Image (cartoon, coloured by chain):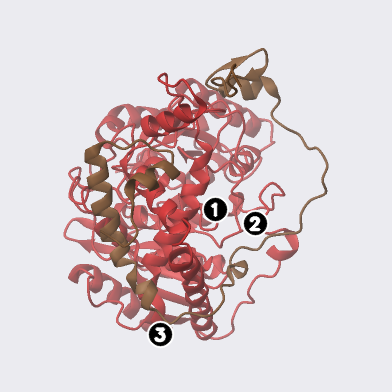
Chain colours: A red, B brown
């Protein structure tokens, strides 16, 4: 049976467009039809401007006809998470606070996609202000896992992962502060990368925890994920933490030796589901069979990662979210007579429960008398975690673990237990704390639910991670997988 | 409750109104999370943090005006504006 358009990878669409076998309009029309068929059921997209995306497709087809193709992404739809600015489109962060905000400018990554001719295709649901691991914290709608509609898709980029897994779009952008790209990628059976901190500009990404946030690519194949990253990663003077051209050229030199993969001591032990452990072990065995050297690595401060992350991230969030005061943009309470009432009432009405919880926690760990015990100690722990990872990555090319300890849980299962939900990110958080690139790759199933494994590399070693992931993907059948819907 | 956790004081610092139920809920949840954080208090940590290793900040740019959004775009997204400026509740009392 011929493949439907919605089943095609971005790389395949690109080559069919180049060969004149397909038009961008045909791709977009097929995806719009899929959207009407499925989006209510999945809840991945929060909005899609059909007229606008068809106009973008026609413009791409006209460029192609005139021999002025801009890049391999020209004419290919890329869906955008709700916290990344697209001029003239909603920028709600799935929060009541920003329900009516229309972005007056484009994020750097959106400018880059437009310059490459990509179609900026619809907005994707997320946990409010990217705070969560299930997309249940969205104030707009729930998103469901396409592999099992009673389960969560992961989060916070749950809309991005679910849209890819259900064939609603071939490429999507997510953002990742503690695992928000990789954890939903694992739960939905797709590929997701958090780049090295500083590789992709954060200009136009609504800030959650600025020293941890990165925008990254999500796709159904490793090649598609790399194709998208190559467009996103470029210098940008508007983000002072974004690498300039010189820094980008200091890429790790390709090793002549065979692949060396580090596996943290005891990583498949306590708390990891049996089928997740088995799928991860099978990935380790696969690399071994391909001649890779498997080396046990010691990361003694791993236990500190979750508390360190939740101190640093909530501290930065409480500071970043102080800007939502009802003055310049966002919700302003109708019941306020004084400026203080305006700020307090607007914030209380606009923020949802998880955002309030994190603001309170962040306020506490920064408050007088407690900052030294919590925030300052967390910064010191962060240094230690990074040093341990860099030391391990001197001996190995990458570190392999499960992406998430257990597969996607039932909607509502962990709503009342924030600490349990925070532990979803136990394997993904260290890469954010240490600023390292990390990738989740589908590697099997736990029952009917997808499972991914996780690779972390040295700074700017993205291409090494992609190459290793490609080696695995080529020998297995998890690439471009979609459930029957 | 975690030592020092005063939910009323925190809510005031964070500029949030909390209902009585929310105060109980958040106090309990934050206590649980802060108890979990105690591993940090017990850990053997380096004397200094060197987060600059993670966050590579470039030199500051020269102090020159750059392109900005302009007042039309800015007031368009503001909750309330008047004559090209953002309006807010009265800040200064008449009687002072």
Question: Gap in Å between the C-alphas at discs 2 and 3?
Answer: 30 Å
Q: Are callouts 3 and 1 both on one chain?
A: yes
Secondary structure category for the residue under label 3: loop
Q: Looking at this view, is A485 or A338 the one in front?
A: A338
Q: Are marks 1 and 2 in contact (CB under 8 Å)?
A: yes
What residue does disc 2 label? A241
Secondary structure category for the residue under label 2: loop
Badge 3: residue crowd in 10 Å (few <14, some 14–19, many ≥20): some
What residue does disc 1 label? A210
Reading the chain from its start, which is encountered first: label 1 or label 2?
1
What residue does disc 3 label? A298
Q: Looking at this view, is A446 or A140 the one in front?
A: A140
Q: Are marks 2 and 3 in contact (CB under 8 Å)?
A: no
**What residue do we see at 62% from left, 54% from top?**
A233
Q: Are callouts 1 and 2 both on one chain?
A: yes
Q: Is residue A396 above or below residue B11?
A: below
**What residue do we see at 22% from left, 70% from top?**
A271
Q: Is residue A148 above or below residue A257?
A: above
Q: Looking at this view, is B23 or A267 the one in front?
A: B23
Question: Gap in Å between the C-alphas at discs 3 and 1?
Answer: 28 Å
Secondary structure category for the residue under label 1: loop
Q: Looking at this view, is A380 or A83 the one in front?
A: A380
**What residue do we see at 37% from left, 66% from top?**
A307
């Amino acid at each position: 049976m011929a493949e439907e358009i919605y089943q095609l990878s971005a790389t395949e669409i690109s080559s069919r467009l180049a060969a004149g076998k397909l038009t961008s309009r045909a791709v977009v029309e097929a995806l719009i039809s899929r959207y009407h068929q499925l989006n209510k059921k999945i809840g991945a997209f929060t909005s899609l401007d059909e007229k606008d995306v068809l106009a973008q497709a026609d413009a791409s087809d006209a460029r192609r006809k005139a021999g002025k193709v801009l890049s391999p992404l020209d004419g290919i739809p890329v869906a955008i998470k709700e916290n990344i600015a697209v001029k003239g489109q909603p920028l709600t962060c799935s929060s009541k606070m920003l329900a009516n905000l229309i972005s007056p400018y484009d994020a750097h990554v959106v400018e880059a996609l437009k310059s490459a001719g990509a179609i900026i295709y619809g907005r994707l649901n997320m946990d409010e202000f990217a705070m969560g691991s299930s997309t249940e914290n969205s104030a707009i709608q729930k998103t469901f896992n396409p592999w099992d509609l009673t389960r969560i898709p992961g989060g916070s980029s749950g809309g991005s992962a679910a849209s890819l897994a259900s064939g609603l779009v071939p490429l999507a952008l997510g953002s990742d502060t503690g695992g928000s790209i990789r954890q939903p990628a694992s739960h939905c059976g797709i590929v997701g990368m958090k780049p090295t901190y500083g590789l992709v500009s954060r200009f136009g990404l609504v800030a959650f925890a600025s020293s941890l946030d990165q925008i990254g690519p999500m796709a159904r194949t490793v090649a598609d994920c790399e194709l998208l990253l190559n467009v996103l990663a470029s210098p940008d003077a508007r983000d002072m933490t974004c690498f300039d051209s010189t820094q980008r050229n200091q890429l790790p030199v390709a090793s002549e030796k065979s692949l060396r993969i580090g596996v943290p001591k005891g990583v498949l032990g306590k708390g990891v589901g049996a089928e997740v452990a088995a799928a991860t072990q099978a990935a380790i065995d696969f690399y071994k069979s391909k001649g890779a050297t498997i080396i046990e690595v010691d990361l003694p401060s791993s236990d500190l990662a979750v508390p360190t992350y939740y101190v640093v991230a909530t501290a930065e969030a409480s500071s970043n979210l102080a800007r939502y005061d009802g003055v310049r943009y966002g919700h302003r309470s109708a019941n306020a007579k004084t400026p203080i009432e305006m700020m307090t009432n607007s914030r209380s009405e606009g923020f949802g429960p998880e955002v309030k919880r994190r603001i309170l926690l962040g306020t506490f760990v920064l408050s007088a008398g407690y900052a030294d015990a919590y925030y300052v100690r967390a910064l010191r722990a962060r240094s230690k975690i990074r040093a341990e990872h860099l030391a391990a990555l001197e001996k190995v090319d990458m570190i392999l673990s499960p992406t998430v300890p257990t597969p996607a849980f039932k909607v509502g299962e962990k709503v009342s237990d924030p600490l349990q939900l925070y532990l979803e990110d136990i394997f993904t958080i260290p890469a954010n704390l240490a600023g390292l690139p990390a990738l989740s790759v589908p590697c099997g199933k736990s029952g009917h639910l997808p499972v991914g494994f996780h690779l972390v590399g040295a700074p700017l070693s993205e291409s090494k991670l992609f190459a290793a992931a490609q080696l695995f993907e080529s020998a297995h059948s998890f690439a471009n997988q979609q459930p029957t819907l | 409750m975690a030592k020092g956790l005063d939910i009323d004081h925190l809510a005031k610092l964070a500029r949030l109104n909390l209902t009585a139920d929310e105060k109980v809920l958040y106090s309990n949840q934050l206590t649980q999370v802060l108890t979990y954080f105690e591993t940090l208090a017990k850990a053997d940590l380096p004397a200094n943090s060197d987060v600059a290793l993670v966050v590579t900040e470039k030199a500051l740019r020269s102090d020159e005006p750059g392109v900005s959004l302009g007042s039309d775009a800015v007031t368009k997204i503001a909750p309330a504006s008047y004559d090209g400026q953002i309006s807010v509740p009265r800040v200064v009392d008449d009687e002072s």
